[in-house]
Amino acid sequence: MAVSGVDDYLKALQRFVDDAYGRRMRAQFQTTDGKSELAMLAAPTREEYEQFCRLTAAMTVEEKQNAVRLTDEQVAQIAERAAVDPALAAIFINGYVLKKLKANEKS
């Protein structure tokens, strides 16, 4: 998945929302409390994806352009503005950063 920006990353995740295979994968990685954070970006639930959408909508142009340099505090502030779970916000931004770093390694 080639990702040029945060909005592109969000669009790329959309096709995996509530995917049947993704649900099976998430079940496999589920912890004892029923969470499956490790698989969240591979197959987000509709609720998680909607929070990702609110997060990106709350980001300024500058925050989107500099997403790879956002601090944990900045991500928490954006999450608060967007009224989303700060842990989900951190997972989304970190997933984006990892995709960008991986893409940069290939080029």
Image: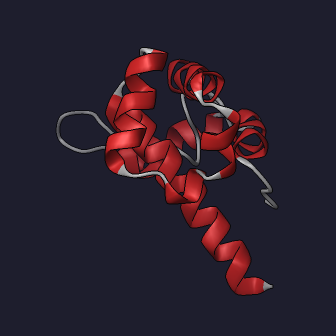
- Residue 10, position in %: x, y? 70, 38
Name the image colouring. secondary structure
Q: Quadrant of residue 22?
A: top right
**Dividing the picture into quarters, in which one does residue 15 lie?**
top right
Q: Nearer the viewer, residue 78 or 29?
A: 78
Q: Is residue 36 visible?
A: no
Res. 64 image quadrant:
top right
Q: Is residue 44 above or below residue 85?
A: below
Quadrant location of the N terminus in the rendered image: bottom right
Asked if 96 appears above or below 64 in the picture, the reply is below
Residue 104: give x, y in percent of width and height. Answer: 71, 78
Residue 93, above or below 15: below
Residue lying at 43% horizontally and 46% vertically, measured from the top left: 91
Q: Is residue 23 above or below residue 98?
A: above
Q: Position of residue 35 (x, y in %)?
A: 30, 36
On the question of residue 39 being in view, the answer is: yes
**What residue is shown at x 34% (from left), y 48% (from top)?**
72
Query: Is 61 placed left or right of 91 in the picture?
Result: right
Furthest-top residue in this view? 83
Q: Is residue 67 rendered to the left or right of residue 76?
A: right
